[in-house]
C-alpha cells in the first residue's frame, strides 16, 4: 500500500503536470493512503512557511496562512528539520499556533515532516486526524519519504524542460569521476 502512494507521486515527477496540480494531487493522495482527515503543504518563502496546498482548502487560506520558522508545530518542524508526531491534543502542545481560518486546528493527532531539497528545508507537510491517532513507524517513515519526494518534485519543476532535453546526462554523471 505504501509503495502505491510513492509510485503515484513518482509518476507526478516524470510527467509534465503543472506544479500546483501536482501538489494538490500529492495532498489528496496522502489523505487517501494514510487514512487521515487532512494534509497541508507549506513551502518556505523569505523565512516564512506559506500554505500552498490542502486537501480541503478554505477560502483565503492558500497563499495567505503564513508561519515564521520556529512558529507553531509546523514552524518547529522546519526550523529543527525533524519529524514531529503528536498522537492526541495537538492543539494543547505549547508550540501550537492557532489559526481561526483552519478547521484542522481542532484536530487531535498531528504528524509533520520537512520537505527537503538537496539537504535544505524547502517546506513542511502535515497530516492530521480528527480523533486521537498513534502514528506507526511506517506512517512516520512514509511521510518523511513523501516530504523528500515533494522536494524532488519542486526541484524538477524549477528545471527548464528544454535545457533538460539538451543536457548531456552521461556527462553529468561522469564529470566528477574525471576530476
Image: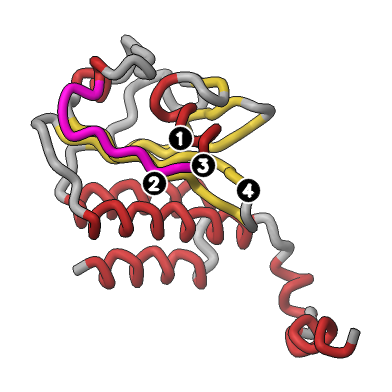
Q: Is residue 98 above or below residue 14?
A: above
Give the class, few, some or many, for how many residues have Cα within 10 Å of label 3's Cα (few <14, many ≥20).
some
Residue at the disc numbered 4: 120
Expressed as whole percent of the image width and height from the top left, the position of residue 74 reads: 42, 29
Residues under numbered marks 2 and 1 in contact, where contact means CB atoms less than 8 Å apart: no
Secondary structure state at the residue bearing disc 4: strand
User: 101 or 170, which lies in front?
Assistant: 170
Quadrant hosting residue 94: top left
Expressed as whole percent of the image width and height from the top left, the position of residue 158 reads: 68, 55
Which badge, 4 or 1, comes first in the chain's sequence? 1
Left or right of residue 76, residue 79 in this image: right
Which badge, 2 or 3, comes first in the chain's sequence? 2
Query: For the residues marked 2 and 3, what is the alpha-carbon distance in whole angstroms?
Result: 23 Å
Which badge, 4 or 3, comes first in the chain's sequence? 3
Left or right of residue 121, residue 86 in this image: left
Report the mark closest to the observer, 2 or 4: 4
The numbered dot on residue 81 is 3
Residue at the disc numbered 2: 24
Query: For the residues marked 2 and 4, what is the alpha-carbon distance in whole angstroms?
Result: 22 Å
Amino acid at each position: 500500500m505504501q509503495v502505491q502512494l510513492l509510485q503515484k507521486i513518482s509518476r507526478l515527477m516524470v510527467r509534465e503536470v503543472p506544479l500546483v496540480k501536482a501538489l494538490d494531487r500529492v495532498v489528496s493522495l496522502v489523505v487517501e493512503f494514510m487514512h487521515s482527515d487532512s494534509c497541508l503543504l507549506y513551502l518556505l518563502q523569505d523565512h516564512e512557511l506559506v500554505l500552498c496546498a490542502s486537501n480541503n482548502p478554505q477560502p483565503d487560506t492558500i497563499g495567505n496562512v503564513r508561519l515564521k520558522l520556529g512558529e507553531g508545530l509546523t514552524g518547529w518542524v522546519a526550523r529543527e528539520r525533524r519529524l514531529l508526531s503528536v498522537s492526541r491534543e495537538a492543539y494543547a502542545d505549547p508550540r501550537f499556533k492557532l489559526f481561526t481560518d483552519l478547521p484542522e486546528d481542532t484536530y487531535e493527532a498531528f504528524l509533520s515532516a520537512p520537505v527537503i531539497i538537496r539537504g535544505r528545508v524547502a517546506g513542511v507537510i502535515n497530516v492530521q486526524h480528527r480523533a486521537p491517532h498513534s502514528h506507526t513507524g511506517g506512517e512516520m517513515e512514509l511521510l518523511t519519504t513523501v516530504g523528500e519526494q515533494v522536494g524532488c518534485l519542486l526541484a524538477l519543476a524549477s528545471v527548464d524542460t528544454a535545457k533538460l532535453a539538451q543536457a548531456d546526462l552521461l556527462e553529468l554523471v561522469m564529470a566528477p569521476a574525471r576530476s
